[in-house]
Image (tube, helix red, strand yellow):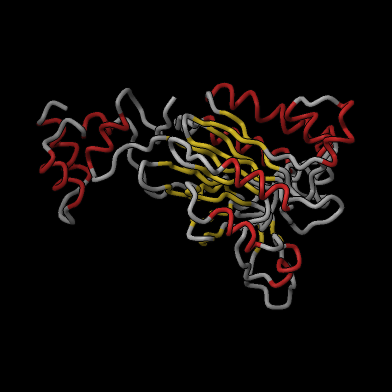
Amino acid sequence: MLGHIGGSGEGDMATKARWGQHPAADLVIAHISDTHLLTGGVPLNGSIDTVANLHLAMERLAGSGIDFDALVFTGDLTDLGEPGAYDILRDAVEPVAARLGAEVIWVMGNHDERAPFAAALYGESVENAGENAARPQDRVHDVHGLRIIALDSTVPGYHHGELTDAQLDWLRRELAAPAPRGTLLALHHPPVPSPIDFHDALELRDQHKLAEVVEGTDVRGILGGHLHYSTHSTFAGVPVSVAAATCYTMTFLEPDRLLSGVDGGQSIDLVHVYDDRIVHTVAPLARFPEVASRPADLIDRISKLDPELRLELLSSKESTFDRLLRALDDAGA
């Protein structure tokens, strides 16, 4: 199933694409991060309902009208790595993903624990718990020709990130042959600088080693989490996009705070994959008062107008919504 920006009827994306210079996206991915769930749905820090936030995110995705090809979760899925917290996560996400027809891709974060992560989310045997705890949870996913590689950048017992030489050798072998639609890397610790000094101690270490592996390959983008705010950069010539958390976010404008986490601004990212580019869009979870709108069912009617008239009615500063409706009625659209 190819991804669409949401619409109200058959052929909407083809119609929308003809209005401008760009075609429909080949694939659409939801990038979600840092859910920080606790067993029993216990509020994080005593006040943040992380389960409700997760359900809101799933509700927003399911009701968006967008055809998602994958849901990528870039780590800190739980706060303490508890098996029961992974059960809450799976039960909230997998039914929605099934309705959307989207593949779910889980990535380890520093608050996760490898053995319960592997058992609950990938069905690996609890008898192999010791092996899973020692083995990085690196996996390769093929999403309609787009290769998404989940990299486990966690260090057991610590919050900073690392990729071992063995992981980098494995990644180099995986990237040796290009994928039909290229590759996205998804890891918790993003290889970007942070405006929060405190994050320097918890960043991905030896980033130059990863850069040496990525340079010259078909990697088209890197998805990250960990920071609890949305940010964008480049790394080894590749765009990096970090999704903010669904649990709580960081603010930078409090001069007397080393860190300032707030219960607001939660969001997810929409990743639109085109043949020649990838577009990342921040989508807030909260619903705000609507101050301007147009009904979705107009798209089919507007598409029937002559292109020059359509441009005039939609772009001219002299045009009004009433004038648009009159033109649609006159055209029998």
Query: Quadrant of residue 117 in the image?
Result: top right
Q: Residue 193 or 79: which is nearer the viewer? A: 193
Give the image location of residue 261, x and y in percent.
Answer: 71, 61
Image quadrant occupied by the C terminus: top left
- In the image, is 79 to the left or to the right of 9? right
Give the image location of residue 112, x and y in percent.
Answer: 79, 44
Q: Residue at x 87, y 27 (%)?
A: 126
Q: Residue 36 or 163: which is nearer the viewer? A: 163
- In the image, is 303 to the left or to the right of 181? left
Location of residue 142 with respect to 207 vertically, above or below: above
Image quadrant occupied by the N terminus: top left
Q: Residue 262 or 273: which is nearer the viewer? A: 273
- In the image, is 170 to the left or to the right of 258? left
Give the image location of residue 35, x and y in percent.
Answer: 70, 44
Q: Residue 273 or 16: which is nearer the viewer? A: 273
Q: Which residue is drawn at 84% across and 33% down?
A: 83
Give the image location of residue 102, x and y in percent.
Answer: 54, 28
